[in-house]
Image (tube, helix red, strand yellow):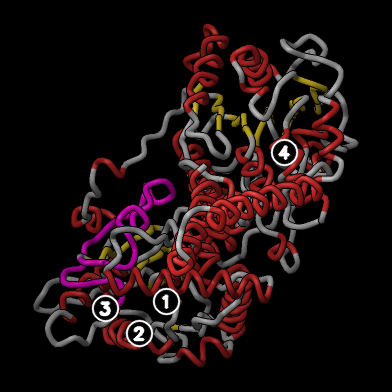
Amino acid sequence: MSEACKSAQPLGLSTGPLPESVDDEEGQTGKCEAEQCLIILLHAYLNQASSLKSVADEIAKHWPNAAICCPELGASVLSLNDPNAIVCDLLSMVDECVDQANQADKPITSIIIVGHSMGGLIGRKLYVAACGETPDAPFEEIYHQAGEVNAQGLLAARTWAPLVKRIVLLAGMNRGWQISHHLSLVHAVGWRLGTVAGYATKLMTGRWPLIFKLRRGAEFITHLRIQWLQLRRLATEPDRLGNLPAGNALTVQLLGSRDDVVSPEDNVDLVAGYDFVYLDVPHSGHADVIRLQDPHYGRGRAKVLMQALGLPADALRSLAATPADDQFLTSNDTIKNVVFVIHGIRDQGFWTHKIARRVKHLAGDSACEWATETSSYGYFPMLPFLLPWYRRSKVEWLMDQYTEALARYPKARFSYVGHSNGTYLVAKALELYPCCRFTNVVFAGSVVRVGYDWTNLLGANPPRVTKVLNFIATSDWVVAFFPKFFQFLRLQDLGSAGHDGFRTSAHSGSFFQVRYVKGGHAAAITEDEWDSIAKFVLTGEVDTQRLPNAVHRKNAFIDLLGRMPPLVWGGIGLVMYLIWEGIELLIHTSVIDPETRGLVTGLALSSYLLTLWLVVTRL
């Protein structure tokens, strides 16, 4: 047996049949589904394998012949581990356990994965990776480094994947975590301080702490949700011989009655968890749901756990808790196309609804097959936009919306219209999330760097993006002076594609640029351009020479200043300095006695700095 299994103890592989059923005075708790049963226990963040000792002891008491593996996941508060690397190690561990059991002529015939909090996410990803890659939800690169590829060029399923009969989640954080009003005061303060420490760690090491990779919308979470959705859909489609592929293991989630760490909408994920069986655990929170030795409530928790592990599916569903109606997300197979219309900075996004309506209007008879997504991430002032971690949080927001749309419209192709920061969101998403795909993409007032790699996205097989239309404005001083400043200094990942255009070798039949549309930062989203945008979304075609307000030259003054954006920033700094000098001169030439002058100067400086702060954080 592997070292991971040995270290977990508390038992080795079974040597005889498991009992057919287990009864006690509280009623039947069920049975293991096969004679040679391997149970994998995965602990929570900040915990160790020993935290699941009471769980392991309870299972061993009922199923004395089961093999129980409880590996250390390396999830300390300072951990910089990659959750995908943890999953790869677990895959190797299970491979070894199964091989050793086969060599001992005692093959494993049933596997159950049990995960607490973070361990539930790791356990589900372990199952997804074991079941093999699906065409519409490719795996991250780390899995390709050690896995075997099948005839379709996809990572093949593990031989033991069909043996996974059940996955049990204890206080799962299925959508990741976020700071919300559901947190207790102590936890809210702790998470806030932890967030600051996480940003500092990223700044110093260039790597995110493990817990940040489990945040709502983060790559690991989004990939897992999308891969899980695709896996479950394919698991219902039999092959030519009528056999169902791996991927239909029963998933049971135990919900603490007073979880004050993970909010209900993050705990119950009815996007990827629509087919879970949910069981309430009385008198339990996020941490103590695994404390089965508690003298007051441990017995009730143990009973629910053993029911989740052993009762037949039908019996479990008769006991299941039904989530609130507003948590359900219904699927609509009639929608064939979805268009995201996402606004930029210093913008509430009211125009997005109008472009969305124009798309449906021009769709004509097929309008019923179109859906629009115009959600807003809120008002985004200039200073937060210039901070990479704030922009990253909006990318995670977008991918959370993307995943929900994928669940709501399973047969739809997605297109995208973005303005300003909305262009950055989708460009970054395409970089970070291999599962992210769009058909027709429109950029207006783009703040993406000019060297963005469209060629690989357009040339992928299948294409990650089918066609792109980028509007370049004549007088977009916002892009020319601010994002271009960071591109000029080669800092961050902002750029001036809305002012200079993209430099790309992408084929002209799939990549279009409008040089130029007359106006400033919002030139391409004015009402005159709505029809052109809508038609491109619908057809992927555009005549860049015959668009409203199309001209052939940029504003010479903006273009000149845009060639040296540091000069503009220096000019802004000089103006700010001169304004303060003017204020000081006014104070010193006014009729104020010397003793009062110092106080007035201090108040004036405070007011001046406060005004500047409000300008960059509110406007």
For the residue pair 219 and 369, the one nearer the viewer reads as: 219
Q: Mark 1 = which residue?
A: 44
Q: Amino acid at mark 3?
A: Asp
Question: Residue 574 location, x and y as percent?
Answer: 72, 51
Please tell me whether mark 2 or mark 1 is closer to you in this view: 1
For marks 3 and 1, the one nearer the N-term is 1
Q: Mark 4 = which residue?
A: 479
Q: Residue furthest left?
A: 25
- Alpha carbon separation for disc pair 4 and 3: 51 Å
Q: Mark 2 = which residue?
A: 56
Label disc, if present, on residue 349 of the rendered structure: none
Q: Is residue 290 above or below residue 293?
A: above
For marks 1 and 4, the one nearer the N-term is 1
Name the residue at 59% across, 31% down.
414
Q: Secondary structure at mark 3?
A: helix
Q: Secondary structure at mark 4?
A: helix
- Alpha carbon separation for disc pair 2 and 1: 15 Å
Disc 2 to disc 3: CB gap under 8 Å:
no
Q: Which residues are magenta?
A: 258-287
For marks 4 and 2, the one nearer the N-term is 2
- Alpha carbon separation for disc pair 3 and 1: 12 Å
For marks 2 and 3, the one nearer the N-term is 2
Left or right, 94 with reference to 257: right
Name the residue at 77% across, 45% down.
568
Q: Mark 3 = which residue?
A: 288
